[in-house]
Amino acid sequence: MIRRALPLMAALAATQLSGCVAAAIAPLAATGALGTKAVTGKKKAQGSDKPAPRPEVSVGQGVSAVPPLIAPAAMPADLPPPTPTPPPTPTLADAPAIANAGDEGDAYAAMAAFVLAQAEAGQTGKQRTSALLDQRSLVELPRMRTCGDQRSAVLIDLDPGEAAFDLDDPPAPERGLSSHLRRIRGTGTAVVWVASLPDSQARRLGQSLKATGLDPLGIDKVMLLSGRETRKQQILDRAGDDWCVLAIVGDRKADFDEVFDYLRNPDGPVAIALEQFIGAGWFLAPPPIK
């Protein structure tokens, strides 16, 4: 009878005890190294109120442990299921990932982060690189222009698609953009608005920007078609003379450079080479004013 109970004792010792205690008791019970008293405990003396003493089992040299009482009916299959482990509480180390997840609906967050980083690099004396394409490099490997000592600026294109900005359409600013622009201006970086409108409309455009809260103080620069200019690329070329353009924001790639309108193969090697600048000076985003 006792020998048949020993394997069960070994299994229960392995499941009920923890650490080195279970590891020591299980083989002892399985091989009979534990005596009858160690398995069943001393039976309660008739008429006595005191429970039978629990034996000690030596585990290693000079260390002893008292095995817990095991109920005969506590079979492993009857044990309650383990309590699910709750998900870990977010810590400060998770903040970047959480912040990125929260920026998924902010189309201008990536641009703002890039411009702020570039502005800080310029303050430490590092060489600034323009976001304007050096068109002479297109015959070899496309590269950006280098900046001189001009003031840093970010160019934001107002034209929706291939159409010119509509001054008669009630303006509604893109969510979150105004707060990004305040931080950018705080670094001394200029905000320059670009549109395919005649220069005579600069005042009206400035009023629209002020009404939307994107330029509440009316201090931003507006660059429109001047004189006989007919192409937005001419505006970009002038901007390169006056500013170190850290970033350009538009809703189509041709807002960065007109070369995208003249590529014979939009998926060819030149187009592939130009893709490296998307997110690193060129930023695709919805029109800032809808």
Image (tube, grey):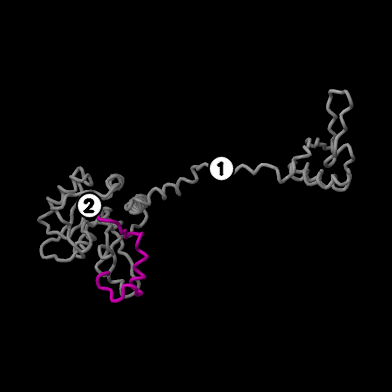
Label 2 packing within 10 angstroms: few (<14), some (14-19), many (20+)? many
Is 88 contained in the magenta span?
no
Q: Disc 2 marks which residue?
A: 289
SS state under label 1: loop
Q: Position of residue 247 (x, y in %)?
A: 30, 57
The reply to whether discs 1 and 2 touch (Cβ–Cβ < 8 Å) is no
**Left or right: residue 83 compared with residue 178:** right
Q: Is residue 276 magenta?
A: yes
Tell me if 155 is positioned left or right of 271 in this view: left
Q: Amino acid at mark 1?
A: Pro
Q: Position of residue 107 (x, y in %)?
A: 32, 53
- Disc on the earlier residue, 1 or 2: 1
Camera-nearest residue between 49 and 107:
49
Determine the residue positioned at 79% across, 35% down: 69
Give the residue displayed 36% in from the left and 70% down from the top. 273
Q: Position of residue 178 (x, y in %)?
A: 27, 46
* Left or right side of 284 for 290: left
Q: Is residue 290 above or below residue 63?
A: below
Q: Which mark is residue 224?
A: none
Q: Position of residue 149 (x, y in %)?
A: 28, 56
Q: Residues within 10 Å of mark 1 (few under 14, many from 20)?
A: few
Q: Label 1 belongs to which residue?
A: 86
Label 1 – label 2 distance at C-alpha: 45 Å
The residue type indicated by label 2 comes to: Ile
Picture residue at 17% right of the left edge, 66% below the top: 231
Describe residue 257's horizontal placement relative to residue 231 as left or right.
right
In front of the other: 93 or 7: 7
Labels 1, 2: front one = 1
Residues rendered magenta in the picture: 260-288
